[in-house]
Amino acid sequence: MITLFNRKELCTTFDLERQALIRDILAANKIDYKLKLANPGRSHTRGHAHSTIGMNLNRANQYTIYVKKDDFEKAKYLINR
């Protein structure tokens, strides 16, 4: 189980396809991971959503992938090959 205390950030990307590829690589190599999704372009202030006009919606989400500290070096190697 990945917790706040035993995890390390493997990567952060705004690219949906890249995060999917990384997750596939980790899963194929039986490396547990945790995905955090943030949408920085859609924050709300005083009940009003910020506009997405002119924003590339394919890159609107920020994906952060965490792995166990013990698996970090192996995971880094695998995604950078």
Image (cartoon, grey):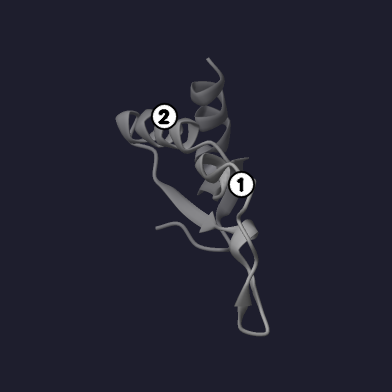
Horizontal arrangement in the rendering, residue 64 relative to residue 50 (left or right): left
Dot label at residue 21? 2
> Which type of secondary structure does the marked residue at label 1 adopt?
strand
Q: What residue occupies the far right of the structure in this picture?
A: 45
Nearest the eye: 58 or 20: 58
Name the residue type under label 2: Leu
Residue drawn at x 64%, y 58% is 40
Where residue 30 appears, as percent x and y from the top left, is: 33, 35
- Vertical order, 44 against 32 (above or below): below
- Foreground label between 2 and 1: 2
> Which type of secondary structure does the marked residue at label 2 adopt?
helix
Horizontal arrangement in the rendering, residue 6 relative to residue 51 (left or right): left
Q: How many marks?
A: 2
Q: What residue occupies the far bottom of the structure in this picture?
A: 46
Where residue 7 appears, as percent x and y from the top left, is: 56, 53
Name the residue type under label 1: Glu
Say few, some or many: other residues with alpha carbon within 10 Å of mark 1 (under 14 / 14 to 19 / 20 or more): some
| Figure quadrant of residue 48 | bottom right
Quadrant (top left, top right, bottom left, bottom right) of the N terminus: bottom left
Nearest the eye: 9 or 61: 61
Residue 69 in view (yes/no): no
Residue drawn at x 51%, y 56% is 36
- Vertical order, 68 against 28 (above or below): below
| Figure quadrant of residue 42 | bottom right
Residue drawn at x 51%, y 28% is 74
Where residue 12 appears, as percent x and y from the top left, is: 61, 42
Please name the residue that numbered disc 1 is placed on: 9
